[in-house]
Image: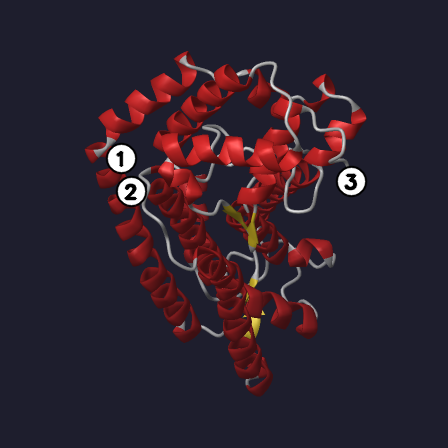
Amino acid sequence: MSFFEAGMPALFSREAGPPTTHHTVLINIFLTLQILGLVGSCALVLTTTLSHRAPRNATWQNFFTSWIISTVSYSLLLFSGQVNKPEPTFGVCLAQAGLIYGIPSLTAATTFGLIAQIWFSVQELLAKKIKNERMWTIGLLILPYMVLFGMVIASWAIGIRNTSLVQVIGSGMYCHIGPSGTLGKVSAAMVALTLLPTLALEISICIALRRNWGHIQAHETLAVHHPPRHHIHHVWDPSHYPERDIRLLRKPRCSVEHCVCYNARHSRHSLLHAERYYRCLDVLDAQSSGASRGREDAYQHFHAHVELQCPSLNEPCVFGDSDVINDRVYFFVALLFKDPTWVD
């Protein structure tokens, strides 16, 4: 009998049995893949969490965190030292069985959250404002774990009432609850219900990008070939300014990455806004060269040009709950006119 003939039935069998040579090989391959996934996911999450050069949004972090939980759950027998045992400890087996039924729903929900965040970004790129985006994002972060919690509790309740059903699956890779497959069907149904809107969002993203590709490409080219003036460059590289100016940059609600809200690379807004913003700075820089004004005069001068050249900039630039439009204006006033009295 070939390995394929002996291995595939064992892989999909739900009837528990003593481990065989073929079972052991399959179990080793399965656990190796789980450990590789665990190490890779942990490396990605730690890198993006600890490094300021590789930031990622919360839904991206949540997506890979769910896969860390998944790999740990499927490797629970390995971590507890009970691999290849026909009857692992009841507590460990029950814990793994509950997680196994909840994990597919968790990863499906975090996938939906990631795609939804991409959809939000595409809408903002096309200058379409999303109402209550922050609340939507919080919901997308919390909902997957609520689904996981519900499935795990339901599985544990069934397992505690029917202890004889808590057993190792036929392949020996992990524990499950009984041969009936009811929990498995419920889990599969929840995954399907989650992936349907995910697919719909993916189609919507593709359609939006296809319809607006020429517009997006044109403004991206403009942003590349018409880079911002030296003031924006200095916002990206604070080393060009003395410490007193860096303190301005570090004001509350105004960070190094977010002070220039309409920059094409760091923006949560459209490239069209970025183009207008560059034009505003060019006009202001040309008309204010060598000028020396007080803080209020400088603010009025700057804001007048913002209103004249870029009406859309009067909309608040929001990061979290903070409206940083005034911080951004004051910051550039300080850089352009070097007001020595305005230093925190």
State the residue in front, 12 or 117: 117
Report the residue marked by disc 1. 209
Q: Are marks 3 and 2 in contact (CB under 8 Å)?
A: no
Foreground mark, 3 or 2, reads 3
Q: What residue is at 41 percent from the left and 14 percent from the top?
A: 226
Tell me how far mark 2 sits from mark 1, CA to CA. 6 Å
Tally of numbered discs: 3
For the N terminus, give its image quadrant: top left
| Residue sitting at x 69%, y 46% | 252
Q: Which residue is mark 3?
A: 344
| In the image: residue 92, left or right of residue 16 | right
Image point (43%, 48%), residue name: 117
The kind of residue tagged 2 is: Ile
**What amino acid is at disc 1?**
Leu
Q: Nearer the viewer, residue 303 or 245?
A: 303
Q: In this image, 94 relative to 223: left or right?
A: right
Relative image position of residue 220 (x, y in whole percent): 36, 22
Secondary structure of the residue carrying numbered label 3: loop
Quadrant (top left/top right/bottom left/bottom right) for the C terminus? top right
Q: Is residue 291 above or below residue 120?
A: above
Q: Earlier in the sequence, mark 3 or mark 1?
A: 1
Foreground residue, 53 or 76?
Answer: 53
Q: Please name the colour scheme applied to the rendered image.
A: secondary structure
Q: Decide: marks 3, 1 in contact (CB < 8 A)?
A: no
- Estimate how packed mark 1 is, as few (under 14), some (14 to 19) or many (20 or more) residues with alpha carbons within 10 Å: some
Q: Which residue was labeled with disc 2?
A: 205
Above/below status of 81 relative to 289: below
Crowding at dot 3, Cα within 10 Å, few <14 / some 14-19 / many 20+, comes out as few
Q: Residues within 10 Å of mark 2 (few under 14, many from 20)?
A: many
Q: Sequence-wise, which precedes: disc 3 or disc 2?
A: 2
**Front tag of 3 and 1:** 3
Q: Position of residue 140 (x, y in %)?
A: 47, 59
